[in-house]
């Protein structure tokens, strides 16, 4: 029986690993060039990553990775896509120039959420069952440090100045704010029930916490820690800000929809029907597209963010998650 991390109650460690399919992120392909944009979609049900050419909206490669891949973090500078495999307890590293698996990092825990620092020096890994975040040097991957956070850490994201790491602790109902220099928690922000996905605006001034069991999104001013809650759809999961910070897109897993929020008015301006059980979402700002991984229908929905209309659907693999930043663009 497959169940998902948002409803997992954390029984014994090994029993939990075996059922971590979460409720609620080899074909040949052209070489990746500086002008190509790709989306890396984790398929948790078949242990693969689908590579989508976002110019063509087609899958151009399928890459075998570890067991039960969930999280994604990508870097154009490093030419790397990092994939968290929760059941094999490791990180797959893909060369995005060749779209081939080049390394696997063992993790003594259960990696879920991933985030890269903007300077590309550190990969942060949320260890779901051991309640910690692991910081990995991207150039010397044997160098790892860790910090205990809250219960069941999931989404995480780094501020544009590399100074702060934000971690959503699902079972603590808070966001831990970590100084990346010292790997110490400086403060916490209480949010709604069961925060999971996080999104940060381009300037770093707005942080969105997606509160799964409350059907809300907390929009937090990172300078004052004040927040406003906005009701969205049933069991929201992930979110993404538009580049101009005017709009927030939220996936609703049990409504099969995406909620579009106007930040200035904090009003819902559109609800877009997508595939079944939408989870991960990333925006490609250069072509005004939002990509949504649909766990229940094994595909990716593509939305035009200028019109908020569904454009197309791309067939991917079984149980597509894509939890994290999965669109590789310039």
Image (cartoon, rainbow, N blue to C red):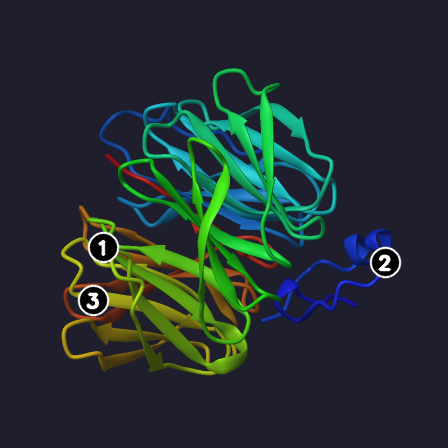
Q: Do tag 3 and tag 1 residues touch (Cβ < 8 Å)? A: no
The residue nearer to you, when weighing 271 against 191, is: 191
Give the label, 3 or 1, closer to the camera: 1
Q: Gap between marks 3 and 2, in whole Å?
A: 41 Å
Q: Residue at x 43, y 30 (%)?
A: 29
Q: Position of residue 311 (x, y in %)?
A: 27, 65
Please identify the quarter of the rendering in which residue 247 is found. Answer: bottom left
Q: Position of residue 132 (x, y in %)?
A: 62, 45
Sequence-wise, which precedes: disc 3 or disc 1? 1
The vertical placement of 155 against 100, above or below, is: below
Q: Which mark is residue 247?
A: 3
Name the residue tied to disc 1: 205
Name the residue tied to disc 2: 12
Q: Residue at x 51, y 74 (%)?
A: 212
Q: How many residues crowd around disc 3 within 10 Å: few (fewer than 14), some, or many (20 or more)?
A: many
Sequence-wise, which precedes: disc 3 or disc 2? 2
Left or right of residue 235: residue 104? right
Sequence-wise, which precedes: disc 1 or disc 2? 2
Q: Gap between marks 3 and 1, in whole Å?
A: 14 Å
């Amino acid at each position: 029986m497959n169940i998902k991390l948002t409803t997992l109650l954390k029984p014994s460690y090994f029993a939990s690993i075996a059922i971590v399919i979460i409720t609620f992120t080899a074909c040949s392909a052209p070489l990746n060039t500086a002008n190509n944009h790709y989306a890396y979609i984790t398929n948790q049900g078949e242990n693969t990553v689908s590579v989508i050419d976002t110019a063509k909206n087609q899958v151009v490669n399928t890459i075998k990775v570890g067991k039960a891949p969930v999280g994604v973090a990508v870097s154009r500078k490093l030419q790397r896509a990092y994939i968290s495999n929760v059941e094999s307890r490791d990180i797959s590293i893909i060369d995005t120039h060749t779209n081939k698996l080049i390394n696997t990092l063992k993790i003594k825990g259960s990696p879920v959420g991933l985030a890269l620092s903007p300077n590309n020096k550190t990969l942060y890994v949320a260890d779901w069952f051991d309640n910690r975040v692991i910081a990995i040097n991207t150039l010397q991957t044997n160098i790892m440090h860790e910090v205990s956070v809250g219960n069941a850490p999931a989404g995480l994201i780094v501020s544009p100045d590399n100074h702060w790491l934000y971690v959503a602790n699902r079972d603590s109902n808070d966001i831990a704010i970590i100084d990346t220099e010292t790997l110490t928690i400086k403060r916490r922000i209480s949010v709604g029930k069961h925060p999971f996905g996080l999104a940060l605006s381009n300037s770093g001034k707005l942080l969105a916490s997606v509160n799964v069991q409350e059907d809300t999104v907390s929009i937090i001013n990172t300078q004052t820690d004040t927040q406003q809650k906005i009701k969205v759809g049933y069991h929201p999961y992930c979110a993404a800000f538009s580049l101009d910070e005017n709009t927030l897109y939220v996936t609703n897993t049990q409504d099969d929809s995406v909620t579009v929020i106007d930040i200035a008015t904090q009003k819902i301006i559109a609800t877009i029907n997508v595939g079944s059980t939408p989870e991960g979402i990333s925006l490609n700002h250069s072509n005004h597209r939002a990509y949504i991984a649909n766990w229940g229908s094994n595909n990716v929905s593509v939305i035009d963010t200028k019109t908020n209309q569904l454009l197309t659907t791309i067939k991917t693999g079984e149980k597509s998650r894509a939890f994290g930043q999965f669109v590789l663009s310039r």
